[in-house]
Image (cartoon, helix red, strand yellow):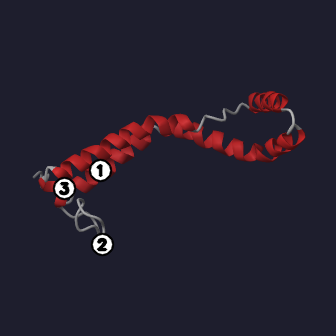
């Protein structure tokens, strides 16, 4: 109605980009933590082999290694846990719009003939 072609599709894209930019600092911490965990994986395997019969010592050695390397094994979870409710609610809104036959939900966007139906 505002005179912008395919506005509903672009609105979805812009909203998604806004959420990604908003959570970018947390995403950087997640990527750093994941990369460090991958780099430390050979040492973790080595410690697991060395202390396979003593899980308490293994946990203590792993905790010490994580603190020395300044890595949080659960550091990658926080951004995902914060973003999931936002994207779930957005998905719920799209389903609701489809169920209520929102007029702009059937418009095409780029190569997709309808945002309400699967892409053929």
What residue occupies the far bottom of the structure in this picture? 120
Earlier-in-chain disc, 1 versus 2: 1
**Residue 6 image position (x, y, % from top left):** 21, 59
Residue at figure coordinates x 70%, y 42% from the top left: 37
Tell me which residue sits at (81%, 47%) in the image. Answer: 42
* Crowd class of label 1 (few under 14; some 14 to 19; many from 20; radius 10 Å): few
22 relative to 32 in the view: left or right: left
In terms of secondary structure, where does tag 1 sit? helix
Separation (CA) of disc 1 from disc 2: 20 Å
**The disc label shown at residue 105, or none:** 3
Crowd band around label 3 with a 10 angstrom C-alpha radius: few (<14), some (14–19), many (20+): some
Foreground pick, 98 / 55: 55
Answer above or below: position of 87 versus 115. Answer: above
Q: Position of residue 13 (x, y in %)?
A: 33, 52
Whether residues under marks 3 and 2 lie with C-beta atoms below 8 angstroms apart, the answer is no
Q: Nearer the viewer, residue 49 or 33?
A: 49
**Disc 3/disc 2 C-alpha distance (Å):** 16 Å
User: Which of the marked residues, 1 or 3, is nearer the chain's N terminus?
Assistant: 1
**Residue under label 2:** 120
Mark 3 vs mark 2: which is more N-terminal?
Answer: 3
Quadrant of the rendering where the C terminus is positioned? bottom left
> Which residue is depicted at the point 48% across and 36% down?
81
Query: Tag 3, which secondary structure?
Result: helix
Q: Residue furthest right?
A: 50
What is the quadrant of residue 49 in the picture?
A: top right
Q: Is residue 4 visible?
A: no
- Is 67 located above or below residue 115 in the figure? above
Q: Is residue 17 left or right of residue 45?
A: left
Query: Which quadrant of the view contains residue 29?
Result: top right
SS category of the residue bearing label 2 = loop
- Residue named by callout 1: 12
């Amino acid at each position: 109605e505002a005179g912008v072609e395919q506005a509903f599709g672009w609105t979805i894209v812009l909203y998604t980009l806004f959420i990604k930019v908003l959570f970018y600092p947390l995403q950087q911490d997640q990527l750093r933590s994941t990369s460090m965990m991958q780099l430390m994986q050979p040492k973790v395997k080595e410690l697991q082999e060395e202390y396979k019969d003593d899980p308490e010592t293994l946990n203590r050695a792993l905790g010490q290694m994580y603190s020395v390397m300044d890595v949080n094994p659960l550091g990658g979870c926080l951004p995902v846990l914060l973003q999931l409710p936002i994207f779930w609610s957005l998905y719920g809104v799209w389903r609701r719009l489809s169920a209520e036959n929102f007029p702009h939900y059937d418009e095409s966007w780029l190569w997709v003939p309808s945002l309400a139906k699967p892409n053929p």
